[in-house]
Image (cartoon, rainbow, N blue to C red):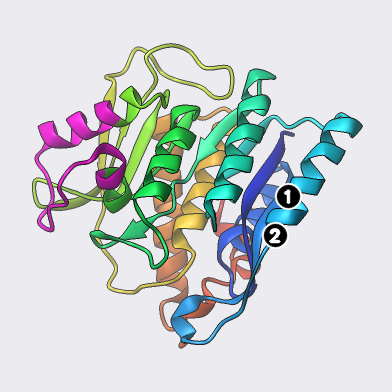
């Protein structure tokens, strides 16, 4: 059992963010802890919402944890709400990493070719710094474009371009990388690049090629929180001993099964009721 710290927002009315990740990782045998970056009333697509940033809480909680000697095997960072908050997380994760904690970074910034509202170039720069300490980062294609200062192509990339983008992310300092929601040679896929050397945190099959691509068939249903589910299943299997490529394939299969089972749900903004679907997580 691994001790995993999740640094992300907590949404009160939807199975997204930390609310989606914690039951998955717990079901997979790990012990989860949380450092919330904000309390959010509901997903923003409802049009009305309330957000309480927890920067002051974070600033006070971290020294207490350090005084108490709390340690984590892994930490996963998600949505940040301010430059100050991002700096707190960067500094804390740097300390954790030096003590042997595996760092996973989900560089949440945007989608569909543009940044989310409130995000700007400074947030991109800070996320590059966050990615620089990652043992594994998993941006979507839009976020990978911003991280690498690469033009967004609505029709996708060639295989050589995808590999080059992965190389650019590794050049930022990440030891391994996955790009989700990619399109390569006209087909939806997830592409990845393993580390060049063994990692303490999870397995790498160094006998396989450095790059991989896993195609999938799109299901024309948009659920909130599927990226968080993907991340949690991916991390859970990595920490249970599966390789990066194996864990990526499993996470993709689980997300596809969850969407298929729940696609008739009327309000997709609620996310997938993960506690009712735990039987699918280990397939």
Is residue 245 or residue 105 the one in the foreground?
105
Q: Residue at x 49, y 64 (%)?
A: 225
Q: Dot 1 surroundings within 10 Å: few (below 14), some, or many (20 or more)?
A: some
Please state the horizontal and vertical placement of residue 193, each as a whole percent of the image: 32, 28
Q: Which residue is mark 1?
A: 58
Of the numbered discs in the image, which one, if any, rests on residue 54? 2
Asked if marks 2 and 1 touch (Cβ < 8 Å), the reply is: yes
Q: From the top left corner, tell me how far across and down residue 37 is, in percent.
A: 64, 56
- Picture residue at 47% right of the left edge, 75% below the top: 262
Residue 102, above or below 39: above
User: Relative to 266, is 88 on the left or the right?
Assistant: right
Mark 2 secondary-structure assignment: loop
Q: Residues within 10 Å of mark 2 (few under 14, many from 20)?
A: some
Is residue 185 or residue 80 the one in the foreground? 80
Q: Is residue 1 left or right of residue 195?
A: right
For the residues labelled 2 and 1, the Cα–Cα distance comes to 6 Å
Q: Secondary structure at mark 1?
A: helix
Q: Give the percent coordinates (x, y) of residue 8.
A: 60, 54
Q: Residue at x 57, y 32 (%)?
A: 103
Residue 274 in the image: above or below residue 209 = below
């Amino acid at each position: 059992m691994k001790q995993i710290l999740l640094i992300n927002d907590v949404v009160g009315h939807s199975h997204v963010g930390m609310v989606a990740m914690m039951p998955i990782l717990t079901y997979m045998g790990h012990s989860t802890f949380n450092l919330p970056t904000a309390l959010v009333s509901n997903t923003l697509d409802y049009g009305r919402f309330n957000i309480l940033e927890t920067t002051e809480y974070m600033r006070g909680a971290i020294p207490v944890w350090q005084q108490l000697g709390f340690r984590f095997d892994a930490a996963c960072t998600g949505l940040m709400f301010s430059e100050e908050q991002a700096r707190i997380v960067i500094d804390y994760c740097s300390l954790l990493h030096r003590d042997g904690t595996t760092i996973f970074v989900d560089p949440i910034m945007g989608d569909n070719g543009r940044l989310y509202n409130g995000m700007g170039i400074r947030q991109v720069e800070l996320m590059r710094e966050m990615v620089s300490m990652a043992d594994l980062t998993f941006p979507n294609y839009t976020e990978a474009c911003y991280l690498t200062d690469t033009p967004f192509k609505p029709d996708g990339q060639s295989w050589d371009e995808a590999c080059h983008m992965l190389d650019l992310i590794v050049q930022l300092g990440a030891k391994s990388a996955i790009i989700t929601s990619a399109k390569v040679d006209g087909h939806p896929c997830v592409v990845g690049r393993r580390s060049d050397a063994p990692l303490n945190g999870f397995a790498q099959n160094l006998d396989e090629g450095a790059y991989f691509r896993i195609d999938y068939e799109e299901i024309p249903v948009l659920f909130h929180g599927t990226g968080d589910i993907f991340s949690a299943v991916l991390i859970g299997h990595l920490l249970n001993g599966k390789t990066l490529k194996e864990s990526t394939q499993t996470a993709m299969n689980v997300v596809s099964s969850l969407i298929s089972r729940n696609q008739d749900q009327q309000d997709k903004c609620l996310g997938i009721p993960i506690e009712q679907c735990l039987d699918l997580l280990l397939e």
